[in-house]
Image: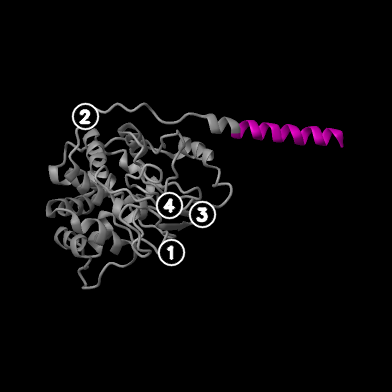
Amino acid sequence: MRIWLVGAFSALAIAGAGFAGLHYWPIGKPVELETTQGDPQRGAYLARMSGCIACHTDFEGGGKPLAGGLKLPTDFGTFYSPNLTTDLENGIGAWTLEDFAKAIRQGVSPNGDPYYPSFPYPFYAKFSDQDVVDLWAAFQTVPPVAEASKAHEMVPPFNVRSGLKVWRGAFLGTEPFRPDPSRNETWNRGKFIVEGPAHCGACHTPRNLLGARQAELYLHGADKLPDGGKSPPITASSLREGGWTVGSLSYALQTGVMPDGDVFGGSMGEVVRDGTAFLSEEDRKAIATYLLERDE
């Protein structure tokens, strides 16, 4: 009996030491930006492209713009989008530009904690320094809203945030954007938007049991989306088989109307309403060009 107790206490001690080690395991890299001069208008455009308004505004609940509180149920628990207004206590008003850059591109909070991957920071790692600074300038114009978002309601063991450091070590990739020199400017612009701010792969790529995207099935569609629906494949071959053209896809990203006269529903309808409908014709064409002409 004594030996069993010693073994049990030893196991608990080892586990405790492991959790303590995770808590103090530092993540993130120092931020060095080449510029600090931002364009708020360009930043506001990038915010639309990135889905910031759609994900951080509870339209159905009557929430104010970017005040957070939008509910996102998943198999790992329920997430609530945070307040991104300039409120000092409930929003990001007390942040610095460096705090913002580290959060956007590294997924690390100002106090060094990892963000859950419901925040698509692996895609935002594609932002240039100028993109980050422009976004920051735009967020500085948002009126403060003194309302705290709800705390995440995670299923154990996913409620242990420090455990995300292990997940990051196993699955996280935050590569900068690299254009393809063999392709033209329109195609590369589409590549940047799709792989970066628009984070199309977040919903159109299946995930494994731990919530990591399956890279070998990039853009092949996924089920178990937060709204309970499924996303179709948007690979070049599947889009062409579905009768899509650059023109029809670009038009659908503006209006939500598909070639057969039906309209996008669910989360894709929201993407159009709050995001792609605000993009320029050139950028919608770039997205369509990249998707339909991608190598698979």
Which disc number belongs to residue 228?
1
For the N terminus, the image quarter is top right
Which disc number belongs to residue 205?
none
- Scheme of image coloration: one colour
Q: What's the residue at 45%, 34% (across, down)?
A: 111
User: At numbered mark 2, what does the secondary structure look like: helix, strand or loop?
Assistant: loop
Q: Residue furthest right?
A: 1
User: What is the crowding at mark 4: few (fewer than 14 residues within 10 Å), some, or many (at least 20)?
Assistant: some
Residue corresponding to mark 3: 77
Amino acid under disc 2: Thr
C-alpha separation, residue under disc 1 versus residue under disc 4: 23 Å
In front: 232, or 124?
124
Question: Is residue 78 covered in magenta?
Answer: no
Q: What's the residue at 12%, 55% (across, down)?
A: 281
C-alpha separation, residue under disc 4 versus residue under disc 2: 31 Å
Amino acid under disc 4: Ser
C-alpha separation, residue under disc 3 versus residue under disc 2: 38 Å
Amino acid under disc 3: Gly
Q: What's the residue at 35%, 42% (across, down)?
A: 92
Q: Is residue 159 above or below residue 168?
A: below
In front: 243, or 110?
110
Which disc number belongs to residue 149?
4
Find out whether the residues at labels 3 and 2 contact each other: C-beta distance under 8 Å.
no
Whole-percent x and y of residue 157?
58, 46
Amino acid under disc 1: Gly
User: What is the crowding at mark 3: few (fewer than 14 residues within 10 Å), some, or many (at least 20)?
Assistant: some
C-alpha separation, residue under disc 3 versus residue under disc 4: 16 Å
Residues in magenta, as a range: 1-19
User: What is the crowding at mark 1: few (fewer than 14 residues within 10 Å), some, or many (at least 20)?
Assistant: few
Residue corresponding to mark 2: 35
Left or right of 189, for residue 27: right
Q: What's the residue at 30%, 34% (across, down)?
A: 97
